[in-house]
Amino acid sequence: QVQLVESGGGLVQAGGSLRLSCAASGRTFSSYTMGWFRQAPGKEREFLAAISWGGARTSYADSVKGRFTISRDNAKNTVYLQMNSLKPEDTAVYYCAATSRTWLTLKINEYSYWGQGTQVTVSS
């Protein structure tokens, strides 16, 4: 069982940066592949990035590649999403999620544990 709590969201101007954090409970955090997703009003939840259990492998959606960076610190049971060059279209609720899959899956239904989400609003 893993419980996830996101933080770091807020209001930022276009072109700005934010770093989201996702703190996990449980002693087995380091065994999970972690992902970040977002959901804008009226839209489906979409995959953004994933990171392997040890942090050596990452995967990104084309929409955020080169702007967002996923990382993790297993000693702190935390996964991060550094977001740079933010755009108004990045406005959404951002979620972290955990999966026991060993590959970097982007499929929402393969993630078993989810946080409650944190709002990111980018003003133009």
Image (spheres, rainbow, N blue to C red):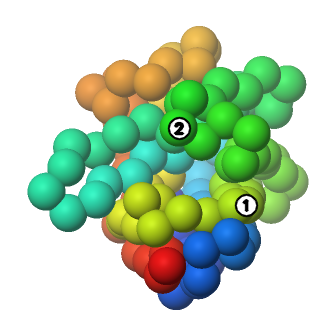
The quadrant of the image that shows the N terminus is: top left
Mark 1 crowd level (few <14, some 14–19, many ≥20, 10 Å Cα): some
Residue 54 image point, x, y percent: 81, 29
Q: Can residue 33 be spotted in the picture? A: no
Seen from this angle, which residue lies furthest front?
124
Q: Is residue 97 left or right of residue 86?
A: left
**Is residue 8 positioned above or below 64 on the image?**
below
- Res 11 seen here: yes
Q: Position of residue 89 (x, y in %)?
A: 42, 59
Q: Is residue 112 above or below residue 96?
A: above
Q: Residue at x 69, y 48 (%)?
A: 68
Amino acid type for the residue under numbered disc 2: Ser
Q: Is residue 80 left or right of residue 75?
A: left
Kindly identify the amino acid type of the residue bearing the numbered disc 1. Asn
- Quadrant for residue 18, please give it: bottom right
Which image quarter: residue 59?
A: top right
In this figure, which residue is indicated by the disc labeled 1?
Answer: 84
**Contact flag, marks 2 and 1 (Cβ < 8 Å):** no
Relative horizontal placement of residue 49, taking residue 96 as reference (left or right): right
| Marks 2/1: CA–CA distance | 12 Å
Q: Position of residue 124 (x, y in %)?
A: 49, 79
Residue 95 location (% of width, % of height): 43, 56
Q: What residue appears at the point 49 percent right and 19 percent down from the top-left corner?
A: 105
Q: Looking at this rendering, what residue extends furthest in the left direction?
A: 42
Q: Which mark is residue 35?
A: none
Identify the residue at the far top of this view. 103
User: Which residue is tagged 2?
Assistant: 63
Secondary structure at numbered mark 2: loop
Q: What residue is at 72 percent from the left and 27 percent from the top?
A: 58
Residue at image x 81%, y 32%?
Answer: 55
Give the vertical position of 17 relative to 108 (above or below).
Answer: below
Q: Earlier in the sequence, mark 2 or mark 1?
A: 2
